[in-house]
Image (cartoon, coloured by chain):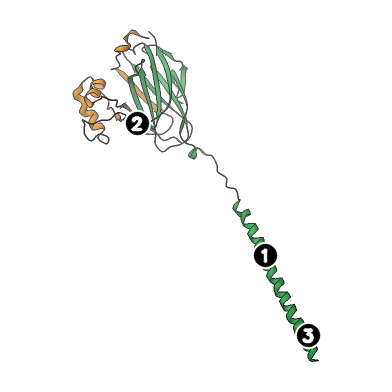
């Protein structure tokens, strides 16, 4: 009887140990499963919408002509003018800015003699057109001219034109 | 090239600007300072009278501390004649 009681106690103890071991293994497996789920959460995609509010302000076109419409786009596009014409340059821009400085610098001849500089500060929120113009009652001297457009102090492009008598 | 390129006359040039965007600061005539410029020279160029330099100085007090010290690259506002 003593033998049977001792054997029974050993068997019960052994079963208890095996049971604990199985539980430990299960706990390890569970934590492993959780760690493989974490990267899935991290790879969730973020959608960035492109709206006018986050498009950087930039010049998209410069055109010359003898007039502009109410939309500030050039009418009568040309690069050759008469002395008494009013010369228009229309600057197309895109993007937004709280205070964008747009400047037109008009120069004459091979020495780039300054004719006129004009600057306007705008608050664009998408595609816009800004026009600049010059004229002179007694007539502009004949010759070759250039208008250079600046945005916030940096050159954004130039256009050459000629005044003919 | 025209014969009068060496001494062209732009003293009567009129200019302006407008935009389809809201304008936060109206169009203003400006002048970018070049090496050798002084307020008197700039006044002579724009108004035909060097003594008018103070008008340019007063319009640019935020940029100019000493009217005898202006620097190439500075963009000055030129009040209407």
What is the distance, in whole Å, between disc 1 and disc 3 at their CAs?
Answer: 35 Å
As drawn, the label of residue A30 is 1
Residue A107 can be seen in this image: yes
* Image quadrant occupied by the C terminus of chain A: top left
Q: Is residue A2 left or right of residue A77?
A: right
Name the residue furthest front.
A3
Chain A shade: green
Q: Is residue A80 left or right of residue B61?
A: right
* Image quadrant occupied by the N terminus of chain A: bottom right
- Tell me if mark 2 has few (under 14), some (14-19) or many (20+) residues whose alpha carbon lies within 10 angstroms of its own: some
Q: Callout 2: helix, strand or loop? A: strand
Q: Callout 1: helix, strand or loop? A: helix
Which is more N-terminal, label 3 or label 1? 3
Q: Are marks 3 and 2 on the same chain?
A: no
Q: Position of residue B24 (x, y in %)?
A: 37, 35
For disc 2, the chain is: B
Name the residue furthest bottom.
A1
In which quadrant of the rendered view does residue B25 lie?
top left
Q: Position of residue A141 (x, y in %)?
A: 34, 12
Along the line of sight, which residue is nearer the eye, A14 or B4?
Answer: A14
What is the distance, in whole Å, between disc 1 and disc 2 at their CAs?
Answer: 69 Å
Residue A85 can be seen in this image: no
Q: To which residue does mark 2 refer?
A: B26
For disc 3, the chain is: A
* In the image, residue A152 above or below residue B14: below
Q: Position of residue A57 (x, y in %)?
A: 45, 34
Question: Depth-wise, is mark 1 or mark 2 nearer the camera?
Answer: 1
The chain drawn in orange is: B
Q: To which residue does mark 3 refer?
A: A7
- Which residue corresponds to the image point at 47% horizontal and 36% vertical from the top-left? A56
């Amino acid at each position: 009887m003593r033998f049977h009681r001792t054997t029974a106690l050993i068997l019960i103890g052994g079963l208890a140990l095996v049971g604990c071991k199985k539980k430990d293994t299960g706990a390890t497996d569970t934590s492993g499963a959780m760690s493989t789920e974490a990267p899935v959460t991290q790879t969730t995609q973020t959608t960035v919408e492109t709206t006018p509010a986050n498009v950087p302000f930039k010049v998209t076109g410069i055109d010359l002509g003898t007039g502009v419409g109410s939309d500030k786009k050039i009418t009568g596009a040309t690069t050759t003018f008469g002395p008494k014409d009013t010369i228009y340059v229309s600057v197309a821009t895109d993007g937004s800015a709280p205070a964008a400085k747009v400047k037109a610098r008009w120069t004459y001849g091979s020495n780039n003699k300054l004719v006129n500089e004009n600057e306007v500060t705008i608050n664009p929120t998408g595609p816009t057109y800004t026009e600049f113009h010059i004229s002179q009652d007694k007539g502009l001297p004949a010759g070759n001219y250039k208008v250079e457009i600046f945005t916030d102090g940096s050159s954004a492009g130039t256009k050459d034109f000629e005044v003919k008598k | 090239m025209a014969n009068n390129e060496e001494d062209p006359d732009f003293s009567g040039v009129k200019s302006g600007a407008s935009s389809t965007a809201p304008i936060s600061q109206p169009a203003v005539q400006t002048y970018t300072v070049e090496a050798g410029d002084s307020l008197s020279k700039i006044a002579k160029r724009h108004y035909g009278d060097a003594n008018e330099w103070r008008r340019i100085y007063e319009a640019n007090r935020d940029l100019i501390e000493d009217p005898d010290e202006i620097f190439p690259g500075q963009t000055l506002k030129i009040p209407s004649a």
